[in-house]
Amino acid sequence: MITRENIRELASFESPEGSALSFYYQPSTPKDKSHREELILVKDLVRSALRESEKNGKNGSTREDLQKILDMAERLHGNSGRAKAVFASSKENFWREYDLPARLAGSRLFVNRRFHLRPLTAIADVLPRLLIVAADKTKARFFELWMDEITEREKLTNEMPRRGRSDGFAGYDAGHAERHVENEALHWFKRLAERMRELQESGYERFLVGCRDENWREIEPQLHPYVRQRFVGHFAIEPATATLAQVRESAEAMYNEFRSQRRTRLVREAIGEAHRNGRGATGLRRVLKALETGEVQTLLLARDFANPAAQCPHCGHLDCHMPESCAVCGKKTEHLDDVADAVLRVAVRTGIEIIHIPDNPELAAVGGIGAVLRFRADQNTEGKKAG
């Protein structure tokens, strides 16, 4: 299973000879069990890539990698319904292969100086790493949902005190026992909240809780502020008997609604803040500047965004004005037919949150790209003094 660290490794890779190969395979419903149609498609993609590399005089190691892709295609046979991504460069002794959810737009193959990451970041955005805690007063089950796969990673049990046979004089013992049970429950839910905080540090991006409604009133006050920042919500479920499928269905439904509302809110926040000269940026030129100055907190990219730009291979500076030489270091720039992948690589390497936005007229009206900023460099007090 691919991790965020794997994606960062891919974003940092560069082949000066232009031999970085990215292959995305999306399984289809074949007309026959031999999957010959898929194989024919892959062969066509390989032939096209070979012609292009030979035209550019870069066919040595690229040919070797393309042959490996062909050999793999012979064995895929639908890949058990999973998509696949391969990133390779024999020149650099590099080969990474990952199974993915079958949510790609189609099978594609790219050969360039850097890996093509847009399909990968789109899947990682739609399917973040979720931690789901199903709990009541006696037990808790911790589930991880990541890249369309759910696993139960651990269980905790609370040994509640037993009630005696007698309530004692005037029911005093009964009241004392009841208070003791309540205190035990409070400590238990604090323990669960602390475990969630510990797991938050291991890279979970969002949290959900499944429980009975009466238990949520006791769990919610114990959540740590760090967990609250990434909290999606709670849903009703029987923690002891819930199946993996039931937990997944409830969690996905809640997260999908949360994601849709958050996308809309972030787009409006970025546009509104940009209009007020605040912590928002819209349009390619402004977003590129914000990326370079480290201002960006969340990058917003329309699904169909595409725009040419120039990039300096020496210092990495991106420029939408297409200059022949870099405005930063003066070296010769290279032309990019689409700057989206270069922008995504910067975001991945620097830990910026990436949100792919489908069909949003407001974002399209400002160029299909925007950002919510952590700060404004031009409004920094020291920066103003220096200016």
Image (cartoon, rainbow, N blue to C red):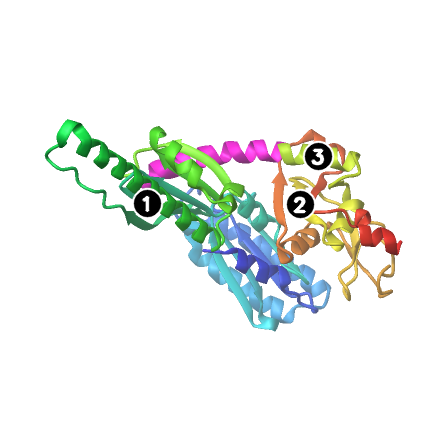
Amino acid tagged 3:
Leu
Q: Which mark is residue 299?
A: 2
Left or right: residue 87 compared with residue 305: left
Q: Position of residue 371 (x, y in %)?
A: 70, 43
Residue at horizontal 66 percent and vertical 55 percent from the top: 345
Q: Residue furthest right?
A: 387
**Mark 1: which secondary structure?**
strand
Left or right: residue 349 compared with residue 310: left
User: Does the CB distance between marks 1 and 2 fall below 8 Å?
Assistant: no
Amino acid tagged 2:
Leu
Q: Which one is nearer the viewer's eye here, 213 or 365?
A: 213
Whether residue 241 is visible, yes or no, is: no
Q: Which residue is mark 1?
A: 141
Q: Residues within 10 Å of mark 1 (few under 14, many from 20)?
A: many
Select label 1 or label 3 by which is in front: 1
Q: Position of residue 204 (x, y in %)?
A: 48, 50
Q: Residues within 10 Å of mark 3 (few under 14, many from 20)?
A: many
Left or right: residue 266 compared with residue 39: right
Amino acid tagged 1:
Arg
Magenta residue check for 247: yes
Q: Earlier in the sequence, mark 3 or mark 2?
A: 2
Q: Which one is nearer the viewer's eye here, 144 or 195?
A: 195
Give the magenta range: 243-264
Q: Which mark is residue 363?
A: 3
Residue at horizontal 57 percent and vertical 31 percent from the top: 261
Quadrant where the N terminus sits is bottom left
Q: Position of residue 182 (x, y in %)?
A: 29, 36
Work out whether 85 lies above or below 256.
below
Whether residue 94 is visible, yes or no, is: yes
Q: Residues within 10 Å of mark 2 (few under 14, many from 20)?
A: many
How far apart are the alpha carbons under marks 1 and 3? 40 Å
